[in-house]
Amino acid sequence: MTGRLMTIAEVADYLNVPYTWLRDKVSAREVPHTRIGRHVQFTEQHVLAIIAAGERRAIASTPATSGVSPLARKLVR
């Protein structure tokens, strides 16, 4: 990415998402962007914020069980 402003099409291509998905997010004001007249533009910071907003933490895996159902484990105790 460079320091220049980018269009919806350029950012959608960069993020590998459909143009319509990004356009709909802009219309709903769900992603950061700048309007210059009628034109929607994105800065590098906008794109980084979109990426950061989509990050999800990994869910810790549960330990493997011995194949015994939870009900059976309760009955044994």
Image (spheres, grey):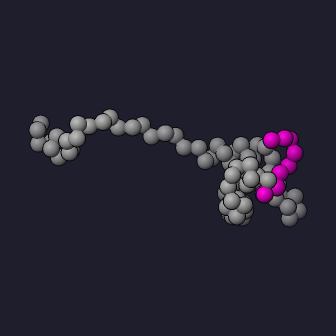
Q: Confirm whether the magenta stretch covers residue 47.
A: no
In the picture provided, is 50 more to the left or to the right than 61?
A: right
Q: Nearer the viewer, residue 75 or 31?
A: 75
Residue 57 seen from this side: yes
Stretch of the chain drawn in magenta = 1-9
Q: How many marks?
A: 0
Q: Quadrant of the C terminus?
A: top left
Q: Residue at x 87, y 58 (%)?
A: 36
Quarter of image, res 30: bottom right
Q: Is residue 53 left or right of residue 56?
A: right
Q: Is residue 21 left or right of residue 42?
A: left
Position in image of residue 33 (x %, y %): 77, 53
Q: Residue at x 20, y 45 (%)?
A: 69
Seen from the viewer's position, the closer of residues 36 and 24 is 24
x%, y% of residue 68? 19, 41
Up-down: is 35 above or below 67? below
Is 16 placed above or below 75 here? below
**Residue lying furthest left:** 76
Place of residue 44 in the rendered image (x, y in percent of width and height, measured from the top left): 78, 43
- Looking at the image, which residue is at 72% across and 61% down? 19
> Residue 72 lies in what quarter of the image?
top left
Determine whether, in the image, residue 56 is placed left or right of residue 37: left
| Prevalent SS, magenta region | loop
Q: Quadrant of the N terminus?
A: top right
